[in-house]
Structures are given as C-alpha cells and as structure tokens.
Image (cartoon, grey):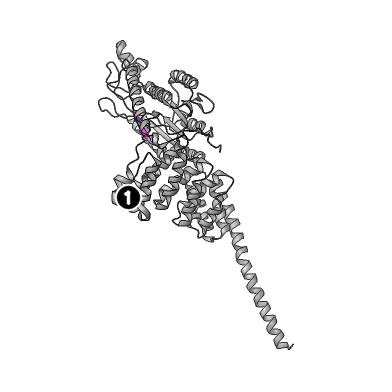
Amino acid sequence: MTSRLLSRRLASLLFASFVMSAALAIPLHAASELKGLKKDVEKAIQAGSEDEAIGLMAQIGALGTEDAIEALFLIGLKLGKTPKLYQAAGDEVAKCAGAAAFLEKRIGADVWQERVFVADIAVRIDSPEARKVLISLTADKHPNVQLSAVAALEKTMHRDAIPPLLDLLEDLMKKKRDVLYQAVLDALYMLTGQEHIIMEDWRKWWSGVGDSYDPKADAEGAGKDQKTSVKRKRRTKGAEFVGVPVDSRFATFIIDTSGTMRYVHKSDIPGLSSGDGSDGGGSSGGGQMTPDDQRLAEFWTRMEMAKRALFDVIEEIEPDTMFNIIRFDTIVDGFKKQLIPANPANKMAALKWAEGLKYKVNSTTNMQDAIEKAFQDPNTNAIYFLSDGLPSKDGKVNDPAGPILDRIFELNRFRKVKIHTFGYHPRGSGGEPYEELEEANTWLKRLAKETGGSFSELKVDPTLTPDNYEKRKRERRKKEKEEEKKEGEGEKSSNFALVYDPVLQP
C-alpha cells in the first residue's frame, strides 16, 4: 500500500471518528443541559419563584427531546402544586412535537394521578392522536380519571368525543347515578344540544345526524346563548341543597357556625335595632320585641336558615348515598370522622346533630381547615360549602385568598372535587345593601369557579313563618313523590338497574 493511499485512509477514518464524536456530543450536551435545568426548576420552586421556574420549563421544552418531555411531565406531576406551575408544565409538554405519542404511552400508568395529568394535557393538543388518548381514558377503572377525560372531551368540541361519551353513558345507566353520570350528560349537552332520558333515543339521534355533524358549527349556528352559555337543567327529583341537586353519592356538607351566623336576615321584623343585617334580635341588644317577633327573628337568623337547608337535604338523600357534615368557626369538627351511608338510623342521628348546631359568638371563620378536613376523606367527590363571611383564622384580619386557593388546588388537582358554595342574599327586606355579605359572596363565587362548582344564595321567603314551615314542607314532599311516581312510570322502558358500586380508593 502506497503512503499516499494510507494517508487517505487515515484521513477518512479520522473524519468518520470526528463525525461520530460530534453526533454523540449533541445528545450528551442536551442531557447535561437538561439535568442542570431540572435542578434549577426545583430550586426556583422551592424558593417560591414561580415565574423563574416557568421560564426554565420553557427552556426544557425547547430541547424537544423525549427526555425533555418526560422531565416536564414529572415536574408538573410532582411539583406543580399551584395552578400556575401545573398549567405551565402541561402547556410545555403539549407544545412538544412528540407529546401525543408520549401521552399514549402513559395511559397504562399504575398511578391514577398520572393518568389524570395525561387527560389534562391531551385536551390542549388538537389532533386525532390526542383525542384517541382521551377516548381511551373514558374506559379507565378509576372514576377520577374518567371524570377528567369527560371534561376534556367536552372542551374539544369535536364530533369524535360523542361516540365514546355515549358508550360511557350507556354503561353508567346500569349503575347508580353519580357525579360522573351527570358530567357525561353535561358534556353531551354542550357538544350536541341534545338531552334524552332513554339510551335508544340517543342512539337514534346520533345515527340520524351521520358523519356530517360538527359541534362547533352547530354551536355557532344555534347561537352562543343557546348552546354554550345555558346550563343543562337537571331532570332528577332527588335531594337538593338550597336548590342545587346533590348529584354526588359521596357528599360532604360544610356549615359555618361563626358569630355572625346569629344575625337576623329578615330586616323588617319590628324591634330590630339595625337595618344592616347585623342584628341578632334579643341576643345582640335589639329593640323591644314581642314574643312572636322574637320567635320570627330567631327563625330568620342565618344559622336557622342554614339548619333548615341542612334538614331538608338530610331527609331527602337516598340510602345508598354516603355523606358527612362538618361545622366550623374557630374550631372545626364533624358529624362523623368519615362518610357514612344515609340509612334511616344515620339520617336520624345526623338530624339530631344538625339540630344542635349553634353559632359561637366572638369566634373566627376557619374556612381552610374545614375544607381540608373534607378532603381528608378520599371518597368525597363533592362539597357543599355554606358561609356568610370571609376566611379569617385569627378573627382580626381576613386571610388572603391566594394561598387558600393554592392549597385547595394542591389537594384537588387530580381529584376534581367540585365545591358548590352558598352565601346569603346581600340585601335586606327593604332592598338595603349588606356590604359584608357582598364581599363574602365575591369570595364564595371565586371558590366555586376555581373548582368547577356553582354559587347560590339563601334568601328570605316573606311568606314563610315558623307556623307554616312544617306544613309547607309536608305538602312539598307529597307533591315531589307524586311527580317522581309519574316520571318513574315514563322511564320504565329505559330499564335502569340502580346498583351501588363503591368508589375506587385513590
């Protein structure tokens, strides 16, 4: 071999070695950079620098590798304990080119919280592959995962979401209806504008619209108010709390018993000393009152109004519903340590416990601890929260809303528990404004919105008195039973088999 040929071969080998080294150096450099960025994100989160952490997440996403996607996913799963961090991690994953394929691999993850996060990310990717991931999750064994998938499919406003939701609805019709059942009906209503009781009618409608149906186009044609703003009305005649249907089979009711709950909400009773809603009748130095007026004032205290709402819902909930009640002022305690079946004996005990609820003068409104106590029961999937004030653990200053909402989000980001809130109408009998109630209701509305719940107000019924309350309640129940009987006869063809099946433990 000539020296010239040998030189050429050596040069070729050296060039090939250089190319290979460079190729290896790129992923090695990316891996090193990723490792450093992950540590920086953790440090930023520990220091409370959310914006810095979010910026670092964007740098991880820019790497575009599968390892980078996985890193972002794990950051959101383990460290995304506030709405901003959780949202940012999910957004960065969704931006990556291989996100849908990555999420598909996670469908079978052992930890259910991980599968919930998969659904929360997949909804942000507008592709058939991402919708396929969500469709697969509607058949998950854990109801929280199914609930997340249903909510995500509703947001897609795509026709691909309708068949799997119909399949899930058909399966749920064979079981006891719960929040998941109602969520499916709500999603189908938003996607189709349709509401049917019998499964056969759903199938008939869907087969008739064919492949041409487009939820987005249909929504635009129907008009926003008709399709996207009006909530579906519940057909059920079951238990209600201040007019809100108790769809949940695992419900916790939280009642405020702080000092302001002694105030009389009906402001036109003779003898009350103030017209701003801060009069507790005889208990707070009100004017001269007759015995009848005193009885009426006590009847319309915020505490008694709350207790009547609680009595009604306890009496109405079905035996296979699991429930608990929590009261709070400075101290938080509950009827039971965990949810219990609503059998006759437990309902009787609950009514007796609720009858003993009393406001505590000079107490605080320890809302956060009350809500955290409700979340301690892993089966709770709906909370009904009634209060007349703002959160304040020490009773001197109001607690800032941000940290409370962040803590609730941390507890709820995978469970998706709706907190339905209830306040008091912020005006007196003569229309005079109650400013403190307006402030309290603003907070309660925010709490409900952050968790996907609803807000409702307790109001004075001027025709209701201590004497006619029990009579009207009996008449209402008689009418409801008659209506249920009529509706039951009309639904026989649907062949619902209401079978109790315990919720899967988280």
Q: Quadrant of the N terminus?
A: bottom right
Q: Is residue 293 left or right of residue 38?
A: left
User: In the rendering, at what x and y percent does residue 278 appear?
Assistant: 34, 23
Q: Residue furthest right?
A: 1
Q: Residue furthest top?
A: 291
Q: Quadrant of residue 402?
A: top left
Q: Residue at x 39, y 29 (%)?
A: 240
User: In the rendering, at what x and y percent does residue 359 appear?
Assistant: 42, 21
Which residue is label 1 attached to? Answer: 219
Q: Secondary structure at mark 1?
A: helix
The kind of residue on which mark 1 rests is Ala
Location of residue 319 with respect to 98 vertically, above or below = above
User: In the rendering, at what x and y percent does residue 58 appear?
Assistant: 50, 56
Q: Quadrant of residue 447?
A: top left
Q: Is residue 44 visible?
A: no
What range is drawn magenta here? 455-461
Q: Quadrant of the C terminus?
A: top right
Identify which residue, 101 or 91, lies in the foreground. 101
Q: Is residue 10 visible?
A: yes
Q: Residue furthest front?
A: 493
User: In the rendering, at what x and y percent does residue 131 appear?
Assistant: 46, 53
Number of other residues with Cα within 10 Å of mark 1, as a class: few under 14, some 14 to 19, many 20 or more: some
Identify which residue, 6 or 453, lies in the foreground. 453
Q: Is residue 337 left or right of residue 225?
A: right
Q: Is residue 29 left or right of residue 130?
A: right
Q: Is residue 271 left or right of residue 43?
A: left
- Is residue 286 located in the magenta-colored stretch of the structure? no
